[in-house]
Amino acid sequence: MFRRLMTLDEAKQIISKYSPSEPLGSEEVALLRAYNRVLAEDAISTLDIPPFNRSTVDGYAVRAQDTFGIEEDRPIKLKVCGTVTVGEKPRIKIDSGEAAEIVTGAPIPNGADAVVMLEDIERKNDQLYVYSAVAKDENIMKAGADIKKGETVLRKNHLLTSREIGALAAIGLAKVKAYVLPRVTIISTGAEVAKLGRKLPAGKVYDINAYSLSTAVQESRGIPIYLGVFPDDFGKMRQVLAKALSSSDVVITSGGVSIGPKDVMPKVLDSLGKPGIIVYGIAIKPGKPVTVASVDGKLIFSLPGHPTSALLVFYLLVRPIIERLAGKKADETLQVKAVTSARMFSAKGRRTFIMVKLKDGPTGLMAEPVAAGLSGAITTLTNADGFVEIAENQQFVDAGEKVTVRLFKKPSC
């Protein structure tokens, strides 16, 4: 039998007590490999961006004062003294009464302080007729207008996506300092679990958890290390867990945590070192048998074997730990408000999590309970967008009630 089941809040508090409060450390990473990493220091520009005054249009670089007083039927005439293209320093200087042909992005030549657009001029040989006046700095992007030298472009702890990578490339950073990604070992247990790629023997099931959990680890900014499937044997399990602890930062197992005669995981966990088991069953549904141990400062999460239960407990307990080790803050966008499409019941005395699918309703998003809510139902995983939480002392959530849906991934729009 399980000891007194902890509440989910009690379990989280205990796990937090034994988990590192800071990221693992930092390392230098090539910018092209820094996607989805978290910055470990501020990124400060050592130059102005753009580094020179540049034209924002195709046209002619001029002195703005030369265009003052233009009327539509009385253009001014300027002499074209050269051309300025991108990628080179201008070799010409614009004097009064002169203009230089220029393309978008090219540096403004000395003497010029504005650019006349092509649609406002007429050129005849080296004579330029300008039909519209321009103000000083018109159609020019000034040096440092985007980023100034010494400016902090990105703050420490910022997640690097394609947009941030572009900003870092703009200031010439080929490498950045990012937090180290935690290594997470994943172990499957049970005589009924079979490896993929082979014909499924009678009485066995494929190793779903290894793949769903490994991917969930990647989504959490961790590096999954899958060791394989192992039998419910005390000696073998103890040996593989000791190996996992020596080579990774977090360990996840699935299966072997219920109260059956072959569920040896709790005994193995308590034999590995102090303090051993810190959580032994939580008053939640699904996922009640989850067991957590701490050994030499590293956490081992032993999740239920049923795929839906295992993945749910991962999102509740494991993901926050991996993200913290990787330097990532909790993502507030991983939840949305919705209205329930049907009444949802809780399990008496246990915090209950109902898998739901989001749909458009007449007043906004609707949360529809996923059919076949049994913890062993595989399709529950693929059909659900997230889950709704019902408190231990709440009997049900009524249809039409507003709820918070915690998402498995960011919404696509």
Image (tube, rainbow, N blue to C red):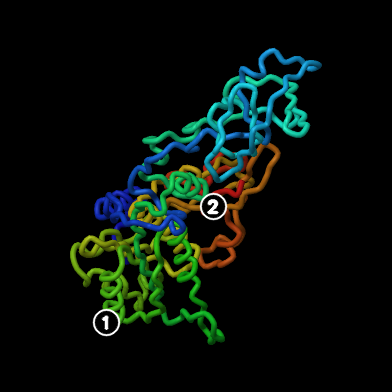
Spot occupied by residue 92 in the image (x, y as percentages of width and height): 56, 35
Q: Nearer the viewer, residue 75 or 394?
A: 75
Type of residue at label 1? Answer: Gly
State the residue at coordinates (65%, 21%): 134
Q: Position of residue 227 (x, y in %)?
A: 38, 76
Question: Which residue was labeled with disc 1?
Answer: 235
Is residue 387 among what the camera can see? Answer: no
- Report the residue at 59% width, 39% height from top: 105
Q: Secondary structure at mark 2?
A: strand
Q: Is residue 299 visible?
A: yes
Spatial separation of the CA atoms under disc 2 and disc 1: 38 Å
Q: Amino acid at mark 2?
A: Gly
Assign the N terminus to one quadrant of the image.
bottom left
State the residue lying farthest toward the right.
73
Residue 87 disc label: none
Q: Left or right? Give the position of 127 relative to 264.
A: right
User: Do the CB atoms of the residues marked 2 and 1 lie less than 8 Å apart?
Assistant: no
Question: Where in the figure is residue 392, as x and y percent of width and height?
Answer: 42, 47
Q: Which residue is mark 2?
A: 386
